[in-house]
Image (cartoon, grey):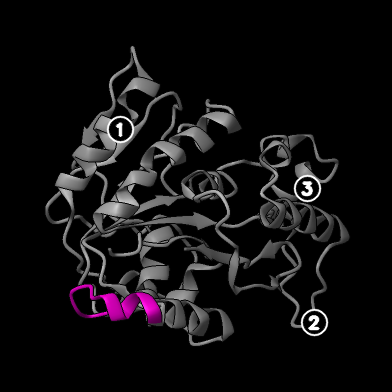
Amino acid sequence: MPVPMPVAFIGHGSPMNTLENNEFTAAWGQFGALFANAEHSRAMNDLGIYATPRAILCVSAHWAPTPAGATLVQMSDDPAMIHDYSGFPPELSQFRYPAAGAPSVALRVADLLRPMCAPAPIGRTTTWGIDHGAWSVLAHVFPHANVPVTQLSIDLTRPAAWHLEAGRRLAILRHQGVLILGSGNIVHNLGAIDWSVDAKAHPAGVRFHDYIVDAIEREDTAAIEAWQEHPDAAYAAPTPEHFLPLLYVLGARAKGERAKIITDGYVYSSLTMYSVRFG
């Protein structure tokens, strides 16, 4: 019987990682190498190799619609590139990731989450596409853009427990050939960035990061749910959108699945690049 698809959280950092070759992007590429361009076989189970996903469901920090209070799925057959940033070189805005959309998976996502959202409907949109939280990572994981992609938005009005439960409901997709990918950062404080080459990680960020990683490794759901009560949360995640994609991944994690770190590290003093997979 085929093993379920893994579920992964990627600390995406700067959108410039799209064009760069560094320790983080190399690790993302190694994660992508776990997927064989073949139909699944029993031998692949023994080798720890996955078939190429049928589709990717990405929960990106960069799709948290305002005003908040709604859950949306991206339904386009041919999703547009969303260049949602400024101040970067023109080469970045010229980058294209021509993946197809996955509207059938988006419909399945809507069905799974509808009871959690009632009485409000789940919105279906073709106006959103693939944002840099998704394509900056996928450019290295699946550089040939050969796997269809859909995205699920983040409703910032929901509590942590809601996002974890959404991940639990979506976990069934792992058995249907869908790779669930969360993209954000555990520590993400743009206001505290230090651009110097020798910038040291801020102690508050280190404490918060270590608290969350320890909770992940111990499968301590209560500690994760209470993340905003940590004394360093206001520094590490002054706004929640980069932290919340992690909760969908942890919700979709099966009990007992060990955390396998893809990469880790600090950049610019106030961002962490921790990336992890389960399965």
**What residue lies at 34% left-to-right and 16% top-to-bottom?**
118
**What residue lies at 85% left-to-right and 55% top-to-bottom?**
204
What residue sits right under mark 3 in the picture?
235
Q: Is residue 93 above or below residue 212?
A: below
**Pointer 2 or 3: first along the chain:** 2
- Please identify, in this view, whether the residue under mark 2 or under mark 1 is nearer the observer: 1
Q: Nearer the viewer, residue 99 or 239?
A: 99
Q: Position of residue 158 (x, y in %)?
A: 53, 26
Q: Is 102 displayed left or right of 206 in the figure? A: left
Q: Position of residue 40 (x, y in %)?
A: 22, 72
What residue sits right under mark 1 in the picture?
112
**What residue lies at 38% left-to-right and 60% top-to-bottom?**
134
Residue range highlighted in magenta: 36-46
For label 1, count other residues whose C-alpha is less than 10 Å away and answer few (under 14), some (14-19) or many (20+).
some
Labelled pair 2, 3 in contact (Cβ < 8 Å): no
Q: Is 77 displayed left or right of 239 in the figure? A: left
What count of labels does the image hold? 3
Q: CA distance from mark 3 to mark 1?
A: 34 Å
Q: CA distance from mark 2 to mark 3?
A: 20 Å
**What residue lies at 51% left-to-right and 48% top-to-bottom?**
245
Q: Is residue 39 magenta?
A: yes
Identify residue type, mark 2.
Answer: Asp
Q: Is 4 displayed left or right of 266 in the figure? A: left
> Secondary structure beneath disc 1?
helix
What residue sits right under mark 2 in the picture?
198
Residue 11 lies in quadrant: bottom right
Residue 170 lies in quadrant: top left
Placement of the N terminus among the 4 image quadrants: bottom left
